[in-house]
């Protein structure tokens, strides 16, 4: 696998946002289950440039248990960026509404 000197930040940001949006459609109860079992989703996606990106999504309580849940995603291209991946997240509360960015 070859890597560019620098990751295409725009492409990576778009891929991360696209995948993070899929978790925004999940219900609070679905995310509670993911937090409870310390679930982590990891997979690869290929950008339009042909670059292979590694993505990881984690689910955890944002503060106290049974409160708001933070979903955090990270993306890197397997190069040096793996040491400092690009991240984004969102918070979902028990009322099933996004608590902000």
Image (cartoon, grey):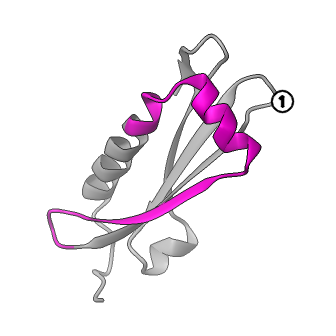
Q: Residue furthest top?
A: 95
Q: Is residue 30 left or right of residue 14?
A: right
Image spot of residue 56 (x, y percent) = 52, 59
Residue 20 picture quarter: top left
Q: Is residue 45 left or right of residue 65?
A: left
Asked if residue 85 lies in the magenta stretch, the reply is no
Q: Residue at x 58, y 39 (%)?
A: 71
The residue nearer to you, when weighing 47 against 37, is: 37
Q: Is residue 33 left or right of residue 56?
A: right
Dot 1 crowding, Cα within 10 Å, few <14, some 14–19, many 20+:
few
Image spot of residue 25 (x, y percent) = 42, 28
Magenta range: 22-50
Q: Residue at x 28, y 47 (%)?
A: 14
Classify mark 1: helix, strand or loop. Answer: loop
Asked if residue 31 lies in the magenta stretch, the reply is yes
Q: Which residue is mark 1?
A: 65
Label count reads: 1
Q: Residue furthest bottom?
A: 1
Image spot of residue 11 (x, y percent) = 25, 56
State whether residue 80 is above or below residue 8.
Answer: below
State whether residue 98 is above or below residue 34.
Answer: above
Query: Where the N terminus falls, by quadrant?
Result: bottom left
The residue nearer to you, when weighing 66 against 71, is: 66
Image spot of residue 90 (x, y percent) = 54, 32
State whether residue 51 is above or below residue 47.
Answer: below
Q: Is residue 11 left or right of residue 86?
A: left
Q: Residue at x 73, y 49 (%)?
A: 37
């Amino acid at each position: 696998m070859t890597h560019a000197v620098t990751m295409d930040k725009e492409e990576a940001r778009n891929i991360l946002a696209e995948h993070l949006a899929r978790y925004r459609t999940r219900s609070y109860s679905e995310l509670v289950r993911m937090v409870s079992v310390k679930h982590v989703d990891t997979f690869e996606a290929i950008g339009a440039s042909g670059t292979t990106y590694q993505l990881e999504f984690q689910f955890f309580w944002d503060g106290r248990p049974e409160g708001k849940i933070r979903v955090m995603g990270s993306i890197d291209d397997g190069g040096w960026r793996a040491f400092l991946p690009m991240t984004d997240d969102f918070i979902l509360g028990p009322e099933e509404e996004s608590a902000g960015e």
